[in-house]
Image (cartoon, helix red, strand yellow):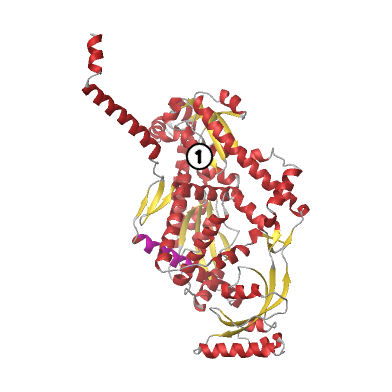
Amino acid sequence: MLEKLREGSQGPVAKIILILVILSFALAGVGSYIASPSEQLAAEVNGESITRAEFDQAYQNERARLENQFGDAFNQLAADPNYIAQFRNDVLQRLINERLLDQAADKYGLRVSDAQVKSQILGMQEFQVDGRFDNERYLAVLYRANLQPAQFRDIIRADLTRRQLQQALLGSEFALPAEAELLVKLNQQTRDLRYVTVPLANFSSQQAPTEEEMQAYYQEHQSNFQTEEAVDLEYIIVDADAIAETIQPSEEEIEQYYQAHLQSYSQPEQRKVAHILVNFSDDEAADKAKAEALLARINSGEDFAELAAEASDESFSAENGGELGWFESGVLPEAFDSALFAISEVGQVSDVVKTEAGFHIIKLLELQAEQAQPLSEVKQQISQRLQQQQAQAAFYAQAQRLAEVAFEIPDSLVDVAKETGLERKTLSGLTRSNASGELAQAQVLNKLFDADFIAEGLNSDAIQLAAESNIVVRVTAHQPSVLKSFEEVQSQIASALTQSKASKAAQEYAESLKQAMLSGEGLDALLYEQNLQVEAKYRVGRDSQDLEPQVVRQLFTMAKPSEQKVAERITAMNGDQVVIQITAVNEAESVDPSETQRWLQQLANVKTEASYQVLIDVLKSKAEIENLL
């Protein structure tokens, strides 16, 4: 039999089958190398992609901003899956809105020049030291934001282009002085009222709930009596900032970096310039002739500053002898810039130069040569830069090693910690509500409470916490959510039912007070029944601290009383009932003009914001948008 099999394997049919099998494996293998996986997308807007990487970067940046601004308060909010879901959607909608604006700007042919981008960056306070642009600070800030200079320039260009579009479409919004004055009067309006506070405690001695009522409540509200799902876990974090704290660059490294990047620590050449401008008129030839005549007068010995004050069409600089200030190369319009930096000596005057503004005659007033900052001044900056660079390199090496070892040893982080030299941490009883710090991030919580992941009991893949911070987690024990027994929650149910009955009784009593106030009958008897009294407040403003905020809000939403009385019942924050009745509305006697002016600007801003939202809504209504998250 073996001989027959051997003979069969040498036959032409067997060889053909073998070749086909080999080819199938070969092509499959090659395909796995040459077929690049499609990039994950977060959304598509009119066929243009918003990648998952773009979304993740925007999400992490916005999250970091809120964490820096609100600290633990934000972390508590972030522990709520519903809040995080809404937060993520808000970030995606902002990216979609920006893409729609970019597409609209492109449609209308709006562009921003390199000089505008550079001028914007040079003027940003974040990059200035002692009032001047500092290149090292600029690079350091971009590094912390995980951005390259080219990326940041593209961001600024896109932002300026969007502003251009918004200015073109929304810049005409305005408010009328009469509208602002009306708002000021409404804001300064005060109201007189009388009110009765009905304490909830007056109705707390209600009849105890029956066993049947409590059992019915238990059955109807079982979701309120579930224990919270919890896990015990072990985890390892690798973080660039933590690594950076352990690094101290040497003097030699600092010196070498300084010499290699000397240009970054140099103040570029700057020139102080003055000019005379002849604006364009209907006759460009005559304008040029006028400029050439002025140049001839300068060359014949007339004072440049006096001539600028007399003849320049730019009044602002003319008042200062034509002075424009200090500039480095690349900031001014190209033709002006080229002419200025072609001048070789201080005091020299250019030929007539044409730009989009008109014809210029340019004079070099002062020249400040390129200067390098001494090492002593930038040593600390360089040390921090090296610290960040070395920490970044170490982070990527450690993060890669952690991911590899966690995969190779999948069922415990004890050995992973030994192999990588990283610290293993443990935590018991983690729930979605008590999670904090890194463990409170949505992507971590979703992994920890994923049923399949819990069942596997294996190490997770590396989860990105921030641009340079990863975590690997493993669930070591799981406590599922279970329904508490009736006996465990009986006292809680009794309290809730008693509170509910008390609240209902207080509301019914307060409602009868309201009707008595409106009718003018029976009020004294009702007040005597609960030993209450009517109180009064006069000239209560919108910012009053004498009453609870919701009472003040309700007061200013009520109609102005006329022949018919106006009263409302409100539930206070502590459960008390408050019945209020307006007795008078006091209009502002006079309006401060400066206050009107302030509201005029605010009202214009509100209208602009409303128009912006209309613009976005219109663009969305005409767009094809696919949310892929």
Dot 1: few (<14), some (14–19), or many (≥20) neighbours within 10 Å?
A: few
Q: Which residue is mark 1?
A: 205
How many numbered badges does the structure rendering display? 1
Please indicate whether residue 467 sits to the left or right of residue 627 in the image: right
* Kind of element beneath mark 1: loop
Depth check, front residue: 432 or 482: 432
User: Magenta-highlighted stretch: main secondary structure?
Assistant: helix
Q: Is residue 469 visible?
A: yes
Q: Please name the residue shown 60% across and 38% down the image.
A: 395
Q: Please name the residue shown 39% across and 50% down the image.
A: 43
Quarter-wise, where is residue 518 in the image? bottom left
**Amino acid on which the number 1 mark rests in the picture:** Ser
Quarter-wise, where is residue 133 in the image? bottom right
Depth check, front residue: 241 or 479: 241
Q: Please name the residue shown 26% across and 13% down the image.
A: 6
Q: Give how far across and how far down residue 27 sits, in percent.
A: 33, 34
- Start-end of magenta stretch: 607-620
Depth check, front residue: 55 or 252: 252
Depth check, front residue: 476 or 498: 476
Q: Is residue 435 visible?
A: no
